[in-house]
Image (cartoon, helix red, strand yellow):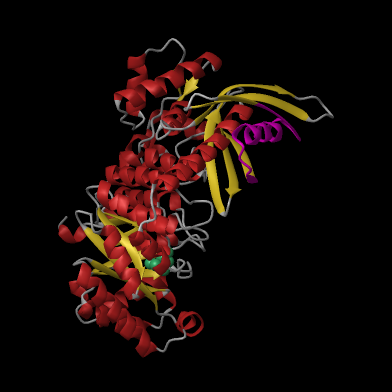
Amino acid sequence: MGIDDRVLIFDTTLRDGEQSPGCSMTQPEKLRVAKALAELGVDVIEAGFPAASKGDFESVNAVAREVRGPIIAALARCAREDIEIAAKAIAPAAHGRLHVFLATSAIHREFKLGMAREEIVRRAVQGVRWAREHCADVEFSPEDASRTELDFLAEVVEAVIEAGATTINIPDTVGYTVPDEFAEVFRYLRRNVRGIEKARLSVHCHDDLGLAVANSLTAVANGARQVECTINGIGERAGNCALEEVVMALKTRESHFKCRTNINTTRLYPTSRLVSSITGVAVPRNKAIVGENAFAHESGIHQHGMLKNAQTYEIMRPEDVGLLRSSLVLGKHSGRHAFRERVRSLGFELEEAELNRVFEGFKALADRKKELFDGDIEALVLNAEGHESSPWSLAAFEVSSRFGEDAQVTLTLRHTDGREVSANGRGDGPIDAAFKAVETATALTLRFRKFEVRALTVGEDAQAEAVINVEHGNRSYRGVAVSTNIVEGGVNALLEVINRIELAQRNASRQPANADRDAIAGAANPAA
Ligand code: KIV
Ligand code: ZN
């Protein structure tokens, strides 16, 4: 296979994925995901939409400063201030890209933009020219391309290539197209756009009809050489094309597509777990490639076939996507060496200090739980990463709960400044009582929006992941923690949020107002 058979993987988990409800991430979380994406081998990381908010600008800027390997892209509308802010955000990247977009379909022209066709062409060309003033690598997306008249789409694409766009991305913004029809869009553009060979063709599909991966593969079969996708398919509404699915389809059916990607597929499963743990959005059990059941065989006939030859019922090897088959792993007598090996084989490389911290958590858990599964160890690692500077921690708690009566919780929290604060809470069940006690101890009032608990492994002593959504001031926060005890898990998830609020307040009082950043925030408009 030659250079033309390489399909670039453009990951937009941090932009299209993050902008969907329930998936927002803090800056340190975005950095963790960006580093994991670099390890996975994606070609482009779309790190955000810098003009949307000061926080978005700072996250894109941090990714551009700290992540090496992939191209770092930032999204901007065809507006000078958007493009300038985006250019500033990606300036520290070794290789940056500006991604400008403008809607082209009749419905968007009439109802969203109020612009005639000529105006759209003029603005798209202007946007690309402004972007080229800052960056040699410029991508243009005609938003809602799949519902745009083909002749007009071709006219816009030809004009922006002439203006200097180096990648042309064709989005199915509303997840409306179907494979045959989408194939024709790519064939039409390749036949009718003068200069099309000067740009790389890209595809960006949403999953409203469950066709995002199929439509993206069709685009590849018809000349697209970049696929835009997200980990676990998170994204606006029903989500985006799932990275792990499109990558494994190209790999498993390589002889059909005759294309390859640069993805280290053994990093797919750990990256999926990381994104799920950070966003709190669970991966469905039956999700292709990374779901818990994706490689499980229950029926006797299937198990019999599998024992004779795994290929009877498996088209991919679990280890190729980073999933290890072992179920029962370690117990309380296991040593640090065995633990380190297990952590490594699960796809995590930890520094010595971090490994020691996780090992302590492992020993404490092994005292409470007879058998530790891979899922338990993964949860310990994912929860320990990035938690080293948390001000508040839970020191002790006691729960009393009787049928027909309010529950009561007494707890003690420890602060890194040396304080130990005890408080009582009474409420409708132990979780409600525990949250009230935490609010009293930390003197913070929060509005609780959602609390969910889900078992991570099997058995009566399984660990549970507690996910909490709260509001404080005018911001929403999400905390995640893992424990075999749901009160402890719930309190730790809540403390994760409270620690973030306290650290943010400390940072805000330390940093004098930065005129540059304020100017950026003032110029920003809400995301399109
Ligand atoms: O779905 C879409 O059209 C987009 C563009 C900004 C590429 O996300
Ligand atoms: Zn999109």
Residue 304 point in image, percent of width and height? 47, 30
Q: Give the position of the C terminus as an image quadrant.
A: bottom left
Q: Does residue 451 appear in the picture of this structure?
A: yes
Q: Position of residue 234 (x, y in %)?
A: 46, 53
Tell me which residue sits at (65%, 45%) in the image: 448
Q: Nearer the viewer, residue 509 or 236?
A: 509
Q: 238 left or right of 353?
A: right
Residue 181 position in % (x across, y down): 41, 73
Nearest to the observer: residue 181 or residue 412: 412
Q: From where the camera sits, is residue 229 visible?
A: no
Side of 40 where 270 appears, left or right: right
Q: Is residue 311 above or below residue 89?
A: above
Q: Residue at x 40, y 20 (%)?
A: 359
Residue plotted at (33% across, 21% down) = 340
Specify the segment rendered in magenta.
423-448
Q: Quadrant of residue 273?
A: top left
Q: Give the quadrant of residue 93.
A: bottom left
For this view, does 44 lie left or right of residue 526? left
Q: Residue furthest top?
A: 333
Q: Position of residue 152 (x, y in %)?
A: 35, 85
- Front position in the image: 447 or 67: 447
Identified at 18% across, 67% down, the residue is 136
Q: Is residue 453 left or right of residue 223?
A: right
Above or below: residue 102 compared with residue 69: below
**Image quarter for ligand 2:** bottom left
**Residue 245 on the magenta span:** no
